[in-house]
Image: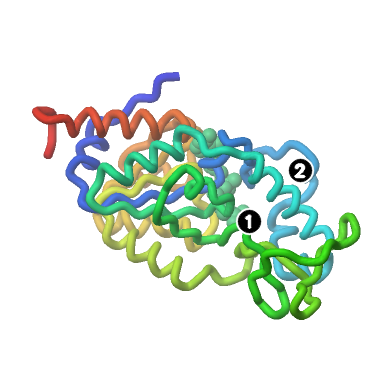
Amino acid sequence: MLVEIPEGLVRALVDAEHVAVLTGAGMSAESGIPTFRDPQTGLWSRYRPEELATPEALRRNPDLVWSWYAWRREKVRQARPHAGHRALVRLEGLVPRFTLITQNVDGLHQRAGSREVIELHGNILRTRCADCGRQVQDWPPAPEGRAPRCPHCGGVLRPDVVFFGEPLPEGALQRAWQAAASCDVMLVVGTSAVVEPAASLPRLAYMRGAVVAEINPQRTPLSDLVHYRLPAPAGEALPALVAALEAARKPGSVGR
Ligand code: APR
């Protein structure tokens, strides 16, 4: 399917001093990592993330929470960045200032070559102790299906991600607010825009007068607000958008 790239969006990117991008689980869907709120298939369809990704679930049933994250971590390890991730790496080199903010915990942007990635919800490939808080690289093997224990204090280990109800990493959130407050264009890619505070970032950018574009095959609560909607998968829309920007920047073409 050929995705149509709005001329106005290309011009806004040509003129932009600062481009911000906010990505969600849909950005990793074409890399084979299930999203949270699309109809789920497979082993974990009977659980909702809200039931597993919480401090209470970890206290109540650390073995189940650990197994769910071990399953997701394996999916992440098998995944590869796709053309959309690589298009964002190209975009970073085409604009004076670029900020990539992600809700994803899979590290695919970094693996594609994005340098500065603001991880709002942490990273599933990092592990920390739920009790002493230390980051832990390796730990004594635990019996099958059991959550491993911290080698320092014997506490329960957990992924270094933000659970529902937990505060986001302060520094990451501050930098994300600053980017939303200063960007000229914000691309919102593959997020259902229902989880705060991430969902407020595009609204802040919009209220400040930034050009906001949504890349998502489905409509979301942001769809009526944004200036442009590209109703296509990230793996198609982002390469097409960046190719249009590269063409527009050629000498003698439109814009700067
Ligand atoms: N390209 C672009 N968007 C896609 C694609 C794709 N190939 N496939 C699905 N999508 C869209 C869906 O239409 C949906 O709007 O991606 C969005 C995924 O939404 P969610 O599953 O809710 O993921 P996300 O918005 O990242 O969730 C936010 O909620 O569960 C918590 O912490 C978790 O970071 C997550 C947060």
Quadrant of the image where one finds ligand 1: top right
Residue 192, given in percent of the width and then of the height, sits at: 53, 46
Which residue occupies 62% across, 43% down?
Answer: 35
Q: Which element carries disc 1, helix, strand or loop? A: strand
Residue 110 vertical position relative to residue 155 in the rendered view, above or below: above
Q: Which element carries disc 2, helix, strand or loop? A: helix
Q: Which dot, 2 or 1, sits closer to the camera?
A: 1
Q: In the rendered structure, which amino acid carries the disc numbered 2?
A: Ser
Q: Quadrant of residue 245?
A: top left
Residue 40, given in percent of the width and then of the height, sits at: 70, 39
Q: Residue furthest right?
A: 143
- For residue 12, which numbered disc appears in the image? none
Residue 45, given in percent of the width and then of the height, sits at: 76, 43
Q: Provide the residue designation for mark 2.
A: 45
User: Viewer-proximal residue, 151 or 174?
Assistant: 151
Which residue occupies 74% across, 78% down?
Answer: 152
Q: In the rendered structure, which amino acid carries the disc numbered 1?
A: Leu
Q: Quadrant of residue 101?
A: bottom left
Residue 101 vertical position relative to residue 250 in the rendered view, above or below: below
User: Viewer-proximal residue, 92 or 199?
Assistant: 92
Q: Provide the residue designation for mark 1.
A: 125
User: Can residue 218 be seen from the camera position used here?
Assistant: no
Q: Quadrant of the N terminus?
A: top left
229 sits left or right of 218 in the view: left
Which residue occupies 53% across, 46% down?
Answer: 108
Residue 70, given in percent of the width and then of the height, sits at: 75, 53
Q: How is the image coloured?
A: rainbow
Q: How busy is the neighbourhood of tag 1: few (under 14 within 10 Å), some, or many (20 plus)?
A: some
Which residue occupies 80% across, 70% down?
Answer: 149
Residue 84 vertical position relative to residue 135 in the rendered view, above or below: above
